[in-house]
Image: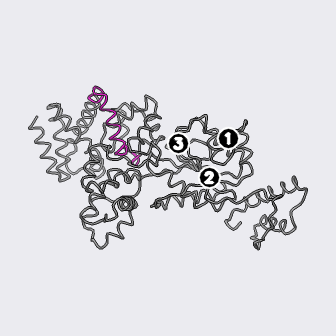
Amino acid sequence: VLRGERNQALKRYRQFRNKLQAELDLEPAPETVKMARAIQAGNTPQLKLIQFQRSDRLLTYQKVSASALPNILVPFIGRETELQQITRYLASQDCRLITLVGPGGVGKTRLAMRAAADDAPEWIHGAWLASLDDVSPDDLETTIAGALGLSTRHNRLRARLYDHLREKELLLLLDNFEQLMSRTNLVKSLLDYAPDLKIIVTSREQLGIRGEQVIQVKGLKFPNVNEISALDEAALPDWSQTYSAIQLFLENARRVSPGFWLGPHNLPAVTQICQQVAGLPLAIELASAWVRIFSCDEIATRLEQNLTLLRRRTTDVPGRHASMEAVFEHSWNLLSDEGRDVLRKLAIFRGKFSLEAAETVALASPDHLAMLLDKSLLRRQGSVYFDLHPLLRQYAFAKLAQRPQLSQEMAQQHGAYYLNRAATWADLYGQMPDEDLADIQIKLENIDAAVQWATTTQQLETFIQQWPGLAHFLDLRGQVVTQMSHANDIVGV
């Protein structure tokens, strides 16, 4: 009642009254009936704490503390908005299934466990974690039962689960559900059979159950390199607190190298690293662990080359989180052959690309893109563009390079598409509208890649056709150095 959940309070009263009649053939005390009527009338009754005598014979329920969740040994950083969202959903009687969706390494597990631990005191029977790492679909009931402290040798295990949860007010956390999408029916059944059960799921893909509340978990907040140039050193401590990605890097770096500090000498490189990994917490943890060996500039340079730097030297984590490559390999293995083919083809794009570009260059249909979005392998950027996480693109591009003929075909289709687009810009005489300039600027990274392809493969005719349009655009943007560089490329060919 004090939380404003009058309907839930009345429901709890009816359950109590029915149980009292069924098991003890008694009616509620007059004070209890009076309180229920006051609630039903919309009045907030005067409440007082009543101390009950313990009776082992009648005591059916016992408060369970958050100790049912494992202790986290490292500080929790950021995610204030997401925590507020989860807390709000848990407090709502209309929301019983919350799914935290995001790519591997984005911090779904840590977020869910923090939210569950914070909310555990609100639950009569506490909060419980079922870790589903490497669990097969056939073993899901066994894993959940074991996590709840039930015997797993029961002949009718599912019925035993239903009986256990039916009258419990309990929060259940199902962690890493993505490889168990064929068993979403069990989650729905548990919610149907246990009216006071709520479930938080972490997954790289939403479950698709009616009433599911999905929260997209993204990378931590990081700054733009350009904004740190005019930053006063004295303002650094307060400034860094506004960016959770920077905080996480600093926290982890100090754990392995206590003398590490953030200053003008390394802030640009730390910011670049956070940008390179797009705020992905696992990648930040793995990268920052190397400050004992490399400078931050060296870490940033090595990150541009490959993913091998992003691996863990400790053994206290699941194999799928031992390295970024292992994270992506897990997602890759969950894809169909068709899905893998589309993902490796999309790796040819640099930065953002449109649906038209994906369809033309990679033969990726809207259904293909929707599938990758659902599996947290593709990101939507505004209303028009998509992109791959930069680290995932590195991984998928390596998969593309393993198919030399396909790689060559994709480079040719990509180069031809963007150079043909550039050729049309010559018709836009005078000052281009701002929206056209912004749209072309987004394509420029892919244009640069197309120019490199044309230079390497001696595509002189194609190169000359696109030059007037590209030169016109670069001239309007004042990018003279880039303009001269591409002109030199043509002369070289």
Of the residues under marks 2 and 1, which one precedes in the sequence?
2
Q: Position of residue 459 (x, y in %)?
A: 16, 31
Q: Residue at x 38, y 41 (%)?
A: 325
Q: Position of residue 15 (x, y in %)?
A: 79, 55
| Rendered image: mark on residue 128 | 2
Residue 255: name its quadrant: bottom left
Report, in whole angstroms, how far the alpha carbon at label 2 lies from the one at label 1: 16 Å
What residue occupies the far top of the structure in this picture? 405
| Residue type of the residue flagged with mark 3 | Asp
In reply to whether residue 108 is colored magenta, the answer given is no
* Nearest the eye: 317 or 406: 317
Report, in whole angstroms, how far the alpha carbon at label 2 lies from the one at label 3: 16 Å
Q: Which residues are magenta?
A: 380-408
Disc 3 packing (10 Å; few <14; some 14–19; many ≥20) = some
| Rendered image: mark on residue 152 | 1
* Nearest the eye: 418 or 485: 485
Q: Circle 3 is placed at which residue position?
A: 133
Locate the C terminus and report the quarter of the image it occupies.
top left
| Residue 248 to residue 400: above or below | below
- Residue 306 located left or right of residue 95: left
* Nearest the eye: 285 or 478: 285
User: SS for tag 1?
Assistant: loop
Of the residues under marks 3 and 1, which one precedes in the sequence?
3
Q: Position of residue 485 (x, y in %)?
A: 13, 45
| Residue 468 to residue 229: above or below | above
In reply to whether residue 393 is colored magenta, the answer given is yes
Locate the N terminus and report the quarter of the image it occupies.
bottom right
